[in-house]
Structures are given as structure tokens and as C-alpha cells.
């Protein structure tokens, strides 16, 4: 009895499930049919829609689609307005996704200079200026002696600024003259200009990277591009919203035109300001244009050795260097101009990669390797994490000549990490060449032979290495992709005194790590 009733229940359950499945299936088919009918009577089918979106002719084609005569009036008008709005949005997004075709010929450099320092500072300009390629003007306060074919820009004398008030007791009136460099350069009437690039006579520009940075922005819009100081105190005193002039800043042509219309009036309203760059920022504030920050512009309000900063450069193109008179030469055993000429050897090979940091490990010897490509390789005993190595070591003092690590606008770390065994062994770039067969840049880095600190660690010392050979493929399009550090790998070597390292784009799944 119990068994037969149980069997009947199971049979009924099966019948109910079959009926529900039939009802569900028929309802699904009906809904699908209704959806298809609706979509064909009101909208384009998906294939046609996709094709038209790819061709960019949505509006012209959709106007051929007609509704029924009853719905033709207001509904058709609303549909056309919606389609026009969609078209405008698509065009706007497409424009934003495109890089501007800005070239070097579209950029004009305005260089603020002093006649008193001209004989020294002109040598800095010669390092980066490209005769017959770069365009620009040096603006001086008085005439200087010139020679033919020096490889320098055109020299002009700044206009008279005696009518402007200047009441800052700590600054100099030359700030008024320098603040008008962009406006005076604009008034020369040069053709086919998209950007004005402002800098000092001791500013070093990596010209190709200037083009790379400015190509990101629409030159028909208002842009004020630059960066802040490394000194937190300086930024507090002046402004974090100000582009520092020594580090260089760029102003788009339309913004320069608007600035020229009001700058003289603007300057009169700020007689108590200290310098030229804070006057420029004050005028930008009146125009309502904020600073667009790019970390590759370097004011370098520091003293001492730039090794810590340049050895851990941000993941961004190196655009400028400044205050070279107050810091040590960036390469040892060279004067300042010679060291910059040495750096330009790497810039010539791959300007987009110069100073870019790579981090890897020698797994056999438990060494940490930090590469600032084209400049220096640092080899340390033990393992330091990439998080630590991304922080600049404090090889420099702040602008007020104090060893105060809280005075910077970024994180720093000690030089030896509180253990003398982890002091870095330095290998500076000596020569570089391009190998057309392997299509690689081959750089040779020699150890700077200073006396290493006493160390009790029982591991091999990098002191045994005399040279490091780095191979790398040029990558001129690296900054058209998302920013990322290059990876590096230690290669096998037959010589105990030579280390071979590969540097390049990280492969899928590649990480800078050393499992202990």
C-alpha cells in the first residue's frame, strides 16, 4: 500500500515537471518573437547597428528608418535628437582617445637668461639644443658677445619693465622680465606654433620627451603643463598649484594668446610676489586654468648628489633637469657640462627610456640590482623590495641645506638602510652603442671604485665585479602604452669580473621578486 502511493506521487511529480517545462518553453519562444518584432520595427538589427557604428555614419543611416504614420510626428523628432546626442558623445570620446600629431617643429622654446652668467650657462644650452630643428629664443637683460655658428638659439633683449611695481625685498626685479618671456615670444609672430616651452638658461631639456609629453594634450585647448618643487617647504611657501619655471613649463598657443591680453594688468596686481613663476601662476588662476602636472619636469631644489633622485626616477619620461650649478656633476670624474654630454649619449640611443628604473635579483648570490637605464646600475648585498627601491636614497640635502627627510614632497630612504653591508656599489655608464645585427643597445657600465665599508656578512661582494654589460632593445613607443617599469634579468657570464643583464618589456606574468 505504502509502496503504490509513493509510486503515484513520483509519477505526478514527473508529469507536473513536464507540463511546467512545456509552458516555460512556449512562453520563452513567444517573448523572443515579440522582442524580435519590436527591435525590427523600432531599431536597427544588431549587425547593421554594429556596422554603422564602425563606419561612423549612424546619424545619416538612422534617418532613413521610418516609423508608422501614427508615430511619425513628435516621436520621430525626439528620436533624431537622441541620435544626435549619441553622435556628439561618440565623436567626443573618439577625439579624446587620439594622440595629437605634435612634432618638434610645433614647439617654441622661450629661454630666460642673464647676461652676467651667459658665458657659463650657454654651454648648458648647447648640450640639448638641436640647430635647424628646435625653434626658440633666448631672452637676455642686456647685449652679450656672440660668435657665428655656436649652435645656439636666436638671442633677443627683453622689453622694458620699469613701469611695473616690484615690492618684494628678498627677490629681484628681473622676475618681471622673465615672467613675460612667453608673451614676448608669442608677439614675434612665429607660424605653426602649438606650444610655448618656458625654461631657464640652466634648464636641460630632453627634447624628444618634451614632444612625447605635449603630444598627449589637445593643443587647441587651454593647458598649463609642468610640475612642483621637490621641496615641501618651497611648495608651501609658493604654491603646489604652481609650475616651477626652472623645471620648465609648457603653455598651449590659445592659452598664450589669452595670457598676452591680460598679463600686464595681472602683473600690476601682484607686486609683492617673489619670482616669475608665481606671477605666471597668479595669472593662470585669474584665467581659471589649473596646473597639469607631469612628474618628468624637475626643478631640483636640492643640494648635493642627484644620484638618489635619478637612480629612482618616477615611471615617466625624463623631460628636464635644473639647478645644475648647485648640485654635483651627475657623472663622477667629469665637470657638469661633460657629465651632461655623457648622458646625451644614452638619450640619443633611446630617449624615452633614459633614467627609467628596472629592478631584478641575482638569485645565486642574493644581490639586489637597481638599474637607472643610461645612467647608473646599483648592486646591493641582500634583498631589498621594489617598494623600498622605488624610494630615492637621501644622497642630497634640501633647499635649505638641512638633512631633514620630512622636507620633501615624496618618500625617501637612508643611503645604507642602517647597515653598512647594504651600501650600493655603483656602476656608471661609460659607453653605449647600437648593434644593428641584434637590434639592441649595448651599454657598458664601469664600477666607481670607492672604498667599500667593512662588512661581516658571509656572502659574495659586488666589489669583484668591474663592469656590467646591459643589452636592451629601443622602445620609442613605450609611452603610448600604460606606464610600467621595464624588467631585467641577470644573464650567464663566463667572466667573474663582468655581469651581463638584459633590460626590456616585462613578459606576461613576470614580476620583480626573489623568493627566499
Image (cartoon, rainbow, N blue to C red):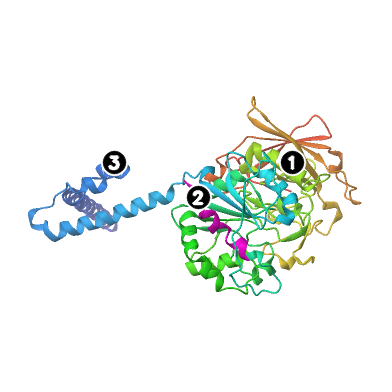
Q: Which residue is mark 3?
A: 51
Residue 389 circle label: none
Q: The N terminus is located in which quarter?
A: bottom left
Q: Nearer the viewer, residue 116 or 221?
A: 116
Indicate which disc, 1 or 3, sits on the residue closer to the N terminus: 3
Q: CA distance from mark 2 to mark 3?
A: 30 Å
Indicate which disc, 2 or 3, sits on the residue closer to the N terminus: 3
Q: CA distance from mark 1 to mark 3?
A: 54 Å
**Residue 323 visible in the current orientation:** no
User: Image quadrant of residue 226?
Assistant: bottom right
Q: Position of residue 230 (x, y in %)?
A: 68, 61
Residue 127, compared with residue 410, is above or below; it is: above
Q: Which residue is mark 1?
A: 342
Mark 3 burial class by Cα count in 10 Å: few <14, some 14-19, many 20+: few
For residue 178: magenta?
Answer: yes
Residue 216 circle label: 2
SS assignment at label 1: helix
Mark 2 burial class by Cα count in 10 Å: few <14, some 14-19, many 20+: some
Q: CA distance from mark 1 to mark 2?
A: 29 Å
- On screen, residue 311 versus residue 283, left or right, reads right
Q: Which residues are magenta?
A: 176-195
Amino acid at each position: 500500500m505504502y509502496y503504490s502511493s509513493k509510486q503515484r506521487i513520483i509519477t505526478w511529480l514527473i508529469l507536473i515537471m513536464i507540463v511546467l517545462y512545456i509552458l516555460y518553453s512556449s512562453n520563452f519562444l513567444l517573448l523572443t518573437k515579440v522582442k524580435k518584432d519590436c527591435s525590427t520595427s523600432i531599431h536597427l538589427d544588431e549587425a547593421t547597428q554594429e556596422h554603422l557604428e564602425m563606419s561612423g555614419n549612424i546619424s545619416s543611416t538612422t534617418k532613413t528608418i521610418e516609423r508608422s504614420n501614427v508615430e511619425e510626428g513628435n516621436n520621430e523628432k525626439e528620436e533624431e535628437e537622441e541620435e544626435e546626442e549619441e553622435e556628439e558623445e561618440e565623436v567626443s570620446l573618439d577625439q579624446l582617445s587620439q594622440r595629437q600629431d605634435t612634432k618638434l617643429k610645433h614647439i617654441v622654446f622661450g629661454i630666460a637668461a642673464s647676461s652676467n652668467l651667459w658665458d657659463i650657462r650657454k654651454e648648458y644650452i648647447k648640450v640639448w639644443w638641436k640647430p635647424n630643428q628646435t625653434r626658440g629664443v633666448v631672452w637676455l637683460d642686456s647685449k652679450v658677445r656672440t660668435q657665428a655658428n655656436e649652435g645656439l638659439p636666436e638671442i633677443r633683449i627683453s622689453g622694458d619693465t620699469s613701469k611695473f611695481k616690484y615690492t618684494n625685498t628678498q627677490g629681484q626685479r628681473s622676475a618681471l622680465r622673465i615672467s613675460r618671456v612667453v608673451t614676448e615670444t608669442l608677439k614675434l609672430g612665429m607660424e605653426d606654433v602649438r606650444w610655448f616651452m618656458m625654461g631657464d638658461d640652466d634648464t636641460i631639456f630632453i627634447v624628444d620627451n618634451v614632444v612625447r609629453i605635449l603630444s598627449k594634450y589637445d593643443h587647441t585647448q587651454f593647458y598649463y603643463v609642468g610640475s612642483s618643487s621637490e621641496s615641501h617647504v618651497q611648495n608651501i611657501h609658493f604654491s603646489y598649484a604652481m609650475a616651477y619655471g626652472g623645471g620648465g613649463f609648457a603653455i598651449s598657443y590659445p592659452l598664450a594668446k589669452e595670457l598676452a591680453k591680460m598679463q600686464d594688468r595681472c602683473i600690476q596686481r601682484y607686486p609683492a610676489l617673489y619670482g616669475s613663476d608665481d606671477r605666471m601662476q597668479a595669472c593662470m588662476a585669474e584665467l581659471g586654468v589649473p596646473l597639469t602636472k607631469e612628474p618628468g619636469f624637475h626643478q631640483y631644489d636640492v643640494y648635493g648628489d642627484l644620484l638618489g633622485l635619478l637612480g629612482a626616477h618616477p615611471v615617466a619620461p625624463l623631460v628636464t633637469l635644473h639647478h645644475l650649478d648647485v648640485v654635483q656633476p651627475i657623472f663622477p670624474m667629469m665637470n657638469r657640462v661633460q657629465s651632461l654630454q655623457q648622458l646625451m649619449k644614452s638619450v640619443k640611443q633611446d630617449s624615452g627610456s633614459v633614467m627609467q628604473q628596472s629592478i631584478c635579483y641575482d638569485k645565486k648570490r642574493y644581490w639586489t640590482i637597481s638599474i637607472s637605464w643610461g645612467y647608473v646600475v646599483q648592486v646591493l648585498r641582500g634583498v631589498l623590495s621594489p617598494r623600498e627601491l622605488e624610494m630615492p636614497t637621501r644622497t642630497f640635502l634640501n633647499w635649505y641645506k638641512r638633512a631633514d627627510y620630512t622636507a620633501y614632497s615624496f618618500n625617501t630612504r637612508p643611503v645604507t638602510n642602517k647597515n653598512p653591508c647594504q651600501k650600493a656599489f655603483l656602476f656608471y655608464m661609460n659607453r653605449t652603442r647600437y648593434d644593428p645585427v641584434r637590434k639592441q643597445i649595448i651599454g657598458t657600465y664601469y664600477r666607481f671604485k670607492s672604498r667599500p665599508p667593512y662588512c661581516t656578512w658571509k656572502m659574495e661582494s659586488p666589489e669583484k665585479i668591474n663592469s656590467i654589460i646591459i643589452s636592451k632593445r629601443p622602445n620609442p613607443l613605450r609611452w603610448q602604452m600604460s606606464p610600467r617599469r621595464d624588467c631585467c634579468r641577470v644573464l650567464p657570464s663566463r667572466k667573474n669580473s663582468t655581469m651581463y643583464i638584459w633590460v626590456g618589456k616585462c613578459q606576461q606574468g613576470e614580476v620583480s621578486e626573489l623568493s627566499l
